[in-house]
Image: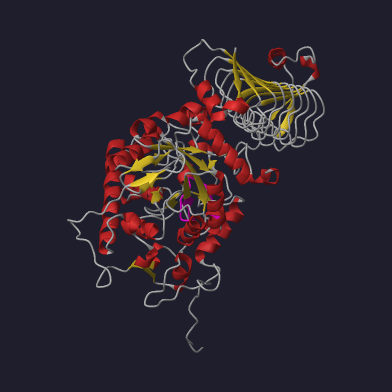
């Protein structure tokens, strides 16, 4: 286990060391102490390593992550795991706005609540939120899966494309072109897998969720839909 | 019946035939007009400025014997690897999707041969573009189509796009006709849909967030890459100041003459300011912060000739960027395709339905047959030629003003032909020492 004192050694030294791991496998376990809400912790990692951050993080922790498993033993600031490519990010606490924004792959697990715009413009990432998600979540979401064990705020899935949204609790309102869809066996299977990998299988069963997706009425501009924009 | 003279038909200056035609089109379709390019209205522009060549009070440099340097460094503020270009004329961001693959390759070839950079666009980085561009600027846009850390690291600079001159405050648009399999795959979208890009970034709002975003991008790329911030010409003084505050190495300022692949005509013609009005405000912001020449300023929007380049630099820009002019150099709107333009209901030099993907010149299309009309090698050579001519023209003017580097051109080398241009550019009206507004507010 490599222990890195962020307060003493600084962000640049941490990210430089983590970026240097590409292509080598000896130092696979890292612990970052004294994060003190710093921004861009472990941003741009591209190696199959485990990184545990002991405390809360600022903006863009695990940004553009590839391959790494990053655990945040606290809460995460805005844009956690933004544009993640692959790997896993697990947050013990809450996540601020834009969690998983534009993520293209990998798994983001938020064991607390996620604020507004969770999964905004997501492009293939899977996100599992054990608590609630805020307003405008999955705005313009393109692909991937967003699972919410709690409630969803206003305008869920506004103008979304092909992302799948699964919500167990209430939805305050659906955004433009977002509709409830039938839960078919393949969706149950997707959820079962995501709940398991998202460490939520003991908290909820797939049958308890409702599925939301695009009505696809805004895919081609039509003047009769102008009031929806 | 007496045959009195009749009042001849008189067109309204308000309801012109063109205005009436647009009213009829809107009434028939219910859809606003979408087109490519920049504003077509007449605006105060570089043509309204003239250079004051040297005479007795200043002496010129010999045109063919005394050196006039043209190189520029970009990104010297924070980046470990700033960019050094031979000429201060760069190629603006234009996406693969809006443009064909061969067109992107031609831009890369021409820019590289001329010693300058080219820029990606709202669609990610293609291999033909990276492979043929010695210096490639990678745009970081609200849509984040194709965004990934590998391409960030393969880029020579990163341009965070906040806005563009054709549509400050607006997002991108790529209609279904151009969403081919390859474009759809790069953008993670279903094939054939009308694609809308967001007008704001998904994970930051405001200058304080932007500062953190830039820091994240620097961390991901180990502080190697220059980071540009591109703004549309709307409030250039404040936006430039905020970009500098957020940590930009370079500010890219795009006036309303700057083109777009597609957006609403009403947006293109009625939002933003001409580049002539933008440059002095941005330069003043840099000077007020003590950052002029430390944070470089690239300006764009209606740059056509070496004279435009020289005028922009005399007003304080470090470099310029061209988009529309580069496409014309490749062959866009060439009269040799007039027969096909006529079939599309338009004519050469007026064709702007780039969003429809039926460009006879094969540049703004994803149709393989049309795209094959552009030879990227020949296109690249034409672009190189054009860039070289612009550079020679700018040098000619600079030498006539007694300058041994384009960067030594200054506002004192200029006068204005109109009161409007004098006020906007902050240079005297020709034959006077009057700069309107100079003593009465900014």
- Foreground: B63 or B91? B63
Give left or right: position of B253 versus A178: left
Residue at far right of view: A170
The type of colouring in the image is secondary structure
- Foreground: B289 or B138? B289
| Residue A202, x across and y down, in percent | 79, 12
Residue B198 visible somewhere in the drawing: no
The residue shown at (60%, 46%) is B207
Residue at far front of view: A8
How many discs mark residues in the rendered view? 0
Give left or right: position of B153 versus B15: left
| Residue B359, x across and y down, in percent | 41, 43
Residue at far left of view: B65
- Foreground: B201 or B9? B201
The residue shown at (72%, 35%) is A116
Query: Is B161 colored magenta in this rendering?
Result: no
The residue shown at (35%, 42%) is B84
As displayed, is residue B69 above or below residue A147? below
| Residue B210, x across and y down, in percent | 59, 42
Residue at far bottom of view: B2
Give left or right: position of B53 versus A201: left
As displayed, is residue B187 above or below residue B52? above
Query: Is B256 colored magenta in this rendering?
Result: yes
| Residue A154, x across and y down, in percent | 77, 36
For the C terminus of chain B, the quadrant is: bottom right
Residue A11 visible somewhere in the drawing: yes
Give left or right: position of A160 versus B331: right
Q: Which segment is the magenta one?
A: B253-266
């Amino acid at each position: 286990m490599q222990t890195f004192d962020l307060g003493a050694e600084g962000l640049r030294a941490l990210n430089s060391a983590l970026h240097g791991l590409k292509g080598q496998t000896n130092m696979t376990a890292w612990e970052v102490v004294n994060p003190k809400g710093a921004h861009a912790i472990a941003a741009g990692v591209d190696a199959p390593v485990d990184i545990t951050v002991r405390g809360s993080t600022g903006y863009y922790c695990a940004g553009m992550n590839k391959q790494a498993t990053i655990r945040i033993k606290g809460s995460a600031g805005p844009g956690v795991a933004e544009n993640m490519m692959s790997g896993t990010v697990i947050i013990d606490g809450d996540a601020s706005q834009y969690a998983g924004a534009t993520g293209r792959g990998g798994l983001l697990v938020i064991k607390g609540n996620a604020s507004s715009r969770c999964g905004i413009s997501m492009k293939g990432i899977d996100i599992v939120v054990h608590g609630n998600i805020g307003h405008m979540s999955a705005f313009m979401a393109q692909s991937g899966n967003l699972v919410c064990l709690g409630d969803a705020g206003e305008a869920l899935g506004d103008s979304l494309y092909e992302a799948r949204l699964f919500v167990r609790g209430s939805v305050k309102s659906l955004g433009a072109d977002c509709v409830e869809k039938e839960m078919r066996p393949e969706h149950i299977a997707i959820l079962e897998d995501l709940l398991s990998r998202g460490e939520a299988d003991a908290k909820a069963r797939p049958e308890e969720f409702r599925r939301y997706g695009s009505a696809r009425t805004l895919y081609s501009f039509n003047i009769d839909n102008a009031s929806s924009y | 019946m007496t045959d009195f003279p009749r009042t001849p038909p008189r067109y309204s200056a308000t309801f012109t035939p063109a205005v009436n035609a647009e009213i009829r089109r809107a009434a028939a379709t219910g859809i606003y007009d979408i087109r490519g390019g920049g504003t077509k209205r007449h605006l105060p522009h570089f043509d309204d400025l003239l250079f004051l060549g040297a005479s007795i009070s200043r002496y010129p440099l010999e045109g063919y014997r005394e050196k006039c340097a043209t190189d520029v460094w970009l990104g010297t503020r924070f980046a470990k690897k700033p960019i050094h270009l031979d000429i201060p004329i760069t190629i603006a961001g234009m996406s693969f999707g809006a443009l064909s693959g061969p067109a992107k390759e031609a831009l890369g070839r021409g820019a590289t041969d001329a010693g300058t950079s080219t820029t990606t666009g709202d669609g990610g980085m293609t291999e033909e573009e990276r492979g043929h561009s010695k210096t490639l600027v990678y745009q970081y846009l609200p849509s984040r189509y194709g965004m990934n850390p590998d391409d960030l690291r393969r880029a020579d600079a990163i341009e965070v796009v906040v806005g563009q001159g054709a549509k400050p405050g607006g997002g991108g648009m790529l209609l279904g006709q151009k969403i081919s399999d390859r474009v759809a795959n790069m953008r993670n979208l279903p094939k054939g849909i009308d694609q809308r890009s967001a007008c704001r970034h998904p994970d930051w709002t405001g200058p304080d967030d932007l500062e953190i975003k830039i820091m994240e991008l620097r961390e991901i790329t180990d502080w190697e890459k220059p980071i540009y911030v591109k703004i549309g010409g709307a409030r250039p003084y404040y936006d430039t100041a905020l970009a500098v505050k957020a940590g930009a190495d370079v500010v890219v300022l795009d006036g309303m003459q700057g083109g777009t692949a597609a957006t609403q005509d009403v947006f293109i013609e009625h939002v933003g300011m001409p580049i002539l009005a933008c440059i002095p405000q941005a330069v003043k912001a840099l000077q007020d912060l003590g950052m002029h020449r430390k944070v470089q300023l690239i300006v764009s929007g209606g740059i056509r000739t070496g004279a435009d380049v020289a005028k922009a630099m005399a007003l304080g820009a470090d470099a310029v960027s061209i988009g529309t002019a580069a496409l014309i150099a490749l062959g866009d709107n060439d009269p040799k395709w007039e027969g096909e333009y006529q079939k599309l209901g338009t004519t050469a030099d007026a064709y702007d339905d780039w969003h429809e993907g039926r460009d006879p010149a094969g540049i703004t299309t994803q149709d393989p047959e049309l795209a094959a009309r552009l030879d990227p090698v020949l296109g690249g050579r034409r672009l190189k030629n054009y860039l070289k001519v612009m550079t020679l023209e700018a040098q000619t003017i600079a030498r006539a003003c007694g300058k041994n580097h384009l960067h030594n051109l200054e506002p004192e080398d200029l006068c204005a032909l109109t009161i409007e241009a004098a006020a906007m550019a902050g240079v005297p009206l020709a034959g006077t020492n009057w700069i309107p507004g100079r003593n009465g507010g900014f």
